[in-house]
Image (spheres, rainbow, N blue to C red):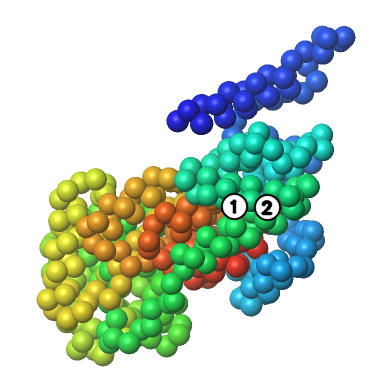
């Protein structure tokens, strides 16, 4: 809290200096309204529809940067462009402020590292993660003489953190393979289920969706629309019916119809409500009783725009249900893309998917190398 307060004061003082009247003319040279979001000017205005990502200055091709560039080209170009676009607010925050750090030909010292730590925290990387990154950067301070070298070292350290948190993808060996999807309402849970159903269906899997969120108005109808789009089956009961009964019938139908994948939607009222957690535990027990070893995955959906609050959600859901993977949505709507780094460093839960838009192809498996390439 004290660090955040000091950062706020520094920003405010800088803002006041910019708006101070000229001593000779008495005129204000620049209008400035204090805000975390940079004011749009002709110089920084970005037309998302026509932005040419390929025209950006390429990352210097050495050591880790070659790996980052190679990783970016291994996956579909379309998604990488959307990922870069989605992370544009975070990238602008990081790169602009890092460049500003070296104004006046400054050298790496304690004051500069403190300012860099504030920048990282502002992007929602988190206090502890930012501290760890600064510690690693300070050990290489002799190699840093400007913003380009600092960005290079920062890329290396972030990629090290992301790779350390990665786990091999879980092979689908069970039939049916049951994925229980959980998360707070509004995080994009229903949309993510629809996109996952479409991905599995496109790969030749027979998919069944269980509409076990029976309490939220129109939840069953929304999931039905996504099932139609993906061309998969949906098992549903009436509103306000027992969610565990829906999950039970879905497993039974999947076994009878030789389905490959079952995606179980669940309610998402406030994660602090004890009755919600008990309800989710009941669904999980019912699935396990019906099919030994299931659910094989418990996928938690988190909203990137909620920042550090997503970490507290993950912790509470994990304590109750032993989460096996996380899907982080809405990365395209926040300047706090650093939450990806914070999640990977803080939680011992793999980040499985990231979402950068509304289209089905905007949900992809998380690739640390591709993410770092897009971030910088």
The quarter in which the C terminus is drawn is bottom right
Looking at the image, is 13 positioned above or below residue 64?
above
- Residue ID at (17%, 62%): 281
Percent from the top left, x then y, of residue 50?
A: 73, 57
Number of callouts in the render? 2
Element type at mark 1? helix
- Residue ID at (70%, 43%): 98
Percent from the top left, x then y, of residue 180?
A: 28, 69
Q: Which residue is mark 2?
A: 140
Percent from the top left, x then y, of residue 20?
A: 74, 15
Element type at mark 2? loop
The quarter in which the N terminus is drawn is top left
Q: Is residue 109 left or right of residue 277?
A: right
Q: Which residue is mark 1?
A: 136
- Can residue 330 be seen by looking at this rendering? no
- Residue ID at (13%, 79%): 290
- Can residue 141 be seen by looking at this rendering? yes
Q: Say which mark, if any, is on residue 98.
A: none
Q: Nearer the viewer, residue 36 or 122?
A: 122
Badges 2 and 1: C-beta atoms under 8 Å apart?
yes
- Residue ID at (49%, 71%): 365
Q: Nearer the viewer, residue 208 or 142?
A: 142
Looking at the image, is 249 positioned above or below residue 337?
below
Q: Is residue 203 left or right of residue 122?
A: left
């Amino acid at each position: 809290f004290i660090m955040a307060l000091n950062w706020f004061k520094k920003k405010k003082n800088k803002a006041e200096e910019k708006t101070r009247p000229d001593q000779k003319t008495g005129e204000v040279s620049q209008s400035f309204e204090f805000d975390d979001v940079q004011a749009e000017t002709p110089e920084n205005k970005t037309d998302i529809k026509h932005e040419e990502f390929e025209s950006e200055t390429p990352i210097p091709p050495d050591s880790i940067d070659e790996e980052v560039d190679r990783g970016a080209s291994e996956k579909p170009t379309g998604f990488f462009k959307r990922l870069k676009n989605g992370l544009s607010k975070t990238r602008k925050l990081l790169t602009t402020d890092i460049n500003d750090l070296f104004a006046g030909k400054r050298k790496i010292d304690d004051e500069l590292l403190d300012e860099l730590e504030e920048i990282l925290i502002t992007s929602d990387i988190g206090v502890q993660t930012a501290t760890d990154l600064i510690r690693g950067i300070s050990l290489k301070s002799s190699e840093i003489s400007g913003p380009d070298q600092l960005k290079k070292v920062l890329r290396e350290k972030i990629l090290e953190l992301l790779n350390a948190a990665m786990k091999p993808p879980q092979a689908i060996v069970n039939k049916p393979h049951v994925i229980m999807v959980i998360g707070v309402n509004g995080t994009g849970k229903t949309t993510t289920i629809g996109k996952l159903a479409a991905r599995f269906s496109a790969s030749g899997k027979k998919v069944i969706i269980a509409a076990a969120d029976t309490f939220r108005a129109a939840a069953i109808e929304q999931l039905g629309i996504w099932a139609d789009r993906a061309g998969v089956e949906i098992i549903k009961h009436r509103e306000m019916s027992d969610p565990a009964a829906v999950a039970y019938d879905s497993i039974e139908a999947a076994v009878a119809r030789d389905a490959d994948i079952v995606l179980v939607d669940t309610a998402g009222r406030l994660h602090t409500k004890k009755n919600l957690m008990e309800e989710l535990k009941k669904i999980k027990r019912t699935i396990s009783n019906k099919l030994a070893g299931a659910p094989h995955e418990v996928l938690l959906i988190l909203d990137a725009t909620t920042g550090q609050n997503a970490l507290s959600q993950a912790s509470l859901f994990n304590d109750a249900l032993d989460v096996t993977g996380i899907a982080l949505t809405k990365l395209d709507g926040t300047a706090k893309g650093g939450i990806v780094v914070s999640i990977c460093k803080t939680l011992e839960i793999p980040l499985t998917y990231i979402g950068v838009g509304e289209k089905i192809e905007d949900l992809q498996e998380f690739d640390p190398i591709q993410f770092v390439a897009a971030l910088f």
